[in-house]
Amino acid sequence: MKPIKNPEEPLALWSGQDRIDNEIHTSVTAIIRSGGCSWNRCRICQYRHERFTGVEKPELSRLMMAQIHRLKEQIEHEKPQVVKVYTSGSFFDPAEVPPDIQEYLINQVKGKTLIVESRCEYVDLERFSRYMDLIREGGETGTIVVAIGLETTSDPIREKCIDKGLHFSEYLKTSDTIHKAGGKVKTYLLHKPPYLTEREAHDDMIRSIREIIPITDLISMNPCTVQRNTHLETLWKRQAYRPPYLWSVASILAQSDAHVTCDPIGGGQTRGPHNCGTCDSMILDAIRDYNLNADQDLMKSVMEMHCDCKDEWEYVMNQEYPWSMPLTR
């Protein structure tokens, strides 16, 4: 039997580096178990299952406070410039993260860059402005970056393929609210949700990146991974879905008009973005380097590489038709 993780410990906690505003910063990242995503319907997401269930609000606050105390210890030890805190849904949703927990965390990172995720409906100008004033008490370098899972600029794809419950117009309005308060916007894009061909997914990302560049401060492209206990996993098991080729990922990054970070979770594995297995690690290493150095020539050089599976990818890009089963696994 798999041991149950200590509920007073973060689900994950690690140190690293992130490129923000053309500079490389030290960072600490924590994944915190919370009250759970209120939307709870996205077809591709397993994280919505990572929640406390059947606990009253005082107990939820206690358990989340314990996890943040552990994060606080890591911050005091590492002294990072950037702190990233991820829950299973929205940091600003009071049902998921009680307001006292929100305020306590921001107090711990005054003067730093705090990155949190939220759905648009929970970003309120008055409250967010107050949080911005609070984080700047530690210095003008203090800021909050709100990461929004836009996934694509196409409303039909976001509604029919992902069931996100978000319209592009809401994203635009929320981005404006965040900027008015002095914060920053990070936009998540999802590469190849279900029901799209390799070509459709590739072209949708190129278009989406181009359309949000004037709006967002940071862009993160997430190549789709087949997570357990999801609708996407059901399709994958029926051979009705294949994660994107790493050739597609590299091609998008090589063509982007802005620096787009990318962390291919499960890269090189059958559930994650993958090629043939021979060239995967080389491309993944190049993507990791590109995340920090923003050297687009590196990604262009990847596209000049040759591997037998590149011919397969090019065939799939040209011959895979909408509303049909994937040509490859």
Image (spheres, grey):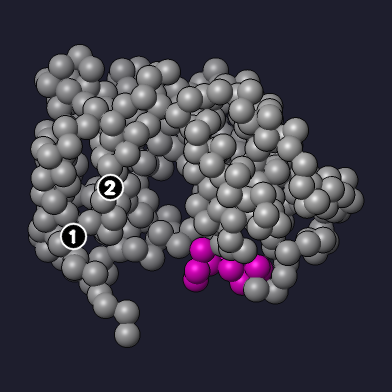
Q: Is residue 170 visible?
A: no
Residue 20 point in image, percent of width and height: 39, 24
Give whichever of 224, 262 is nearer the camera. 262
Q: Is residue 99 left or right of residue 125?
A: left
Is disc 1 placed on a helix, strand or loop? loop
Residue at x 35%, y 54% (from the top left corner): 88
Residue 286 point in image, percent of width and height: 56, 37
Q: Quadrant of the C terminus?
A: bottom right
Q: Is residue 259 left or right of residue 136?
A: right
- Choose the circle earlier in sequence order: 1 or 2: 1
Q: Quadrant of the N terminus?
A: bottom left
Residue 302 point in image, percent of width and height: 68, 35
Q: Residues within 10 Å of mark 2 (few under 14, many from 20)?
A: few
Judging by the rendered image, the residue that carries numbered circle 2 is 14
Give whichever of 193, 28 is nearer the camera. 28
Q: How many marks?
A: 2
Residue type at mark 2? Trp
Q: Main secondary structure of the magenta part?
A: helix
Q: Where 301 sits versus 306, above or below?
A: above
Q: Is residue 152 magenta?
A: no
Is disc 2 placed on a helix, strand or loop? strand
Q: What span is colored magenta in the figure?
A: 227-236
Residue type at mark 1? Glu
Judging by the rendered image, the residue that carries numbered circle 1 is 9
Residue 57 sits in which quadrant?
bottom left
Residue at x 59%, y 56% (from the top left corner): 268
Residue at the farthest top position: 140
Q: Where 286 sits versus 211, above or below?
A: below
Residue at x 24%, y 69% (from the top left corner): 5
Label 1 or label 2, whichever lies nearer to me, is 2
